[in-house]
Amino acid sequence: QSALTQPPSVSGSPGQSVTISCTGTSSDVGSYNRVSWYQQPPGTAPKLMIYEVSNRPSGVPDRFSGSKSGNTASLTISGLQAEDEADYYCSSYTSSSFVVFGGGTKLTVL
Amino acid sequence: EVQLVETGGGLIQPGGSLRLSCAASGFTVSSNYMSWVRQAPGKGLEWVSVIYSGGSTYYADSVKGRFTISRDNSKNTLYLQMNSLRAEDTAVYYCAREGHDSSGYYYVGAFDIWGQGTMVTVSS
């Protein structure tokens, strides 16, 4: 099972918005609303930020939002803050191997 | 406090075996879907294995036949038995709980609780 495709890096200035894409196939992202997003600062465990495409767990700021169109899911972070700098990973349920992750995107806050 | 703590990592020679443990507190392992996820140095996340509350288990193709996931209900602990280890198994191994709502609906693939990770290095 190939990993979902994410851009290696994105950047933005404080206060701006950034969007991270996550492209899969009709066997994963395109067929299931089981897309999640994780935030991972260096040296720490991942933290769930979005589940089932667009739902936020309790405690996650509403600056984080998720969406999906066809085989591509997206994470948008608005009102960018310095503390948002981290690696971000998407994941999706897949019919062939339970869960597949994206390759990760490094977010730099300029 | 809801928490997962992994132990058991270390340096092991290729072909060797290792058992990882993941002790849970604040919730019951046997009532949840529990997974192992690994991350090779400088690389992305890779799902490894899951055990459902009913006991069914599933594995990534990369570890099928070599790794075994299990749990001890009396100790509220999850395990990963790793045999025939290879250099490419070198990674930080995390245990994680799959999120669900109060009615028992599972958010498949949405891991809401993670341990701190334990490092496994396979090298001669």
Image (cartoon, grey):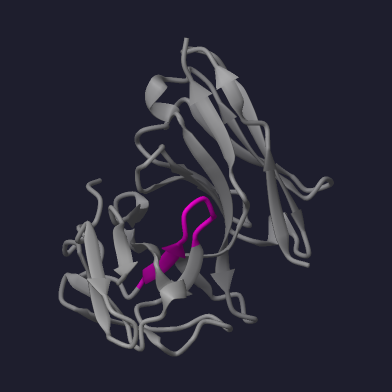
Q: Is residue B124 visible?
A: yes
Q: How many marks?
A: 0
Figure quadrant of residue B52: bottom right
Give x and y (percent) for residue B63. Answer: 42, 32
Residue B7 horizontal side relative to residue B1, left or right: left
Q: Residue at x 59, y 45 (%)?
A: B117
Residue A5 horizontal side relative to residue B71, left or right: left
Residue found at the very far right of the displayed protein: B74
Residue A21 horizontal side relative to residue B72, left or right: left
Residue found at the very far front of the displayed protein: A110
Q: The C terminus of chain A appears in which quarter of the rendering?
A: bottom left
Q: Is residue A50 visible?
A: no
Camera-side residue of B39 and A14: A14
Give x and y (percent) for residue A1. Answer: 25, 46
Give x and y (percent) for residue B77. Answer: 74, 46
Q: Residue at x 64, y 40 (%)?
A: B70
Residue A35 among those drawn in magenta: yes
**Magenta-highlighted residues:** A34-46
Q: Residue at x 35, y 36 (%)?
A: B61
Figure quadrant of residue B53: bottom right
Give x and y (percent) for residue B6. Answer: 67, 43
Q: Residue at x 31, y 56 (%)?
A: A104
Vertical relation: A42 (above or below) B39: below
Vertical relation: B102 (above or below) B65: below
Residue found at the very far top of the displayed protein: B124
Camera-side residue of B119 and B99: B119
Residue B14 among those drawn in magenta: no
Vertical relation: B113 (above or below) B37: below
Figure quadrant of residue B65: top left
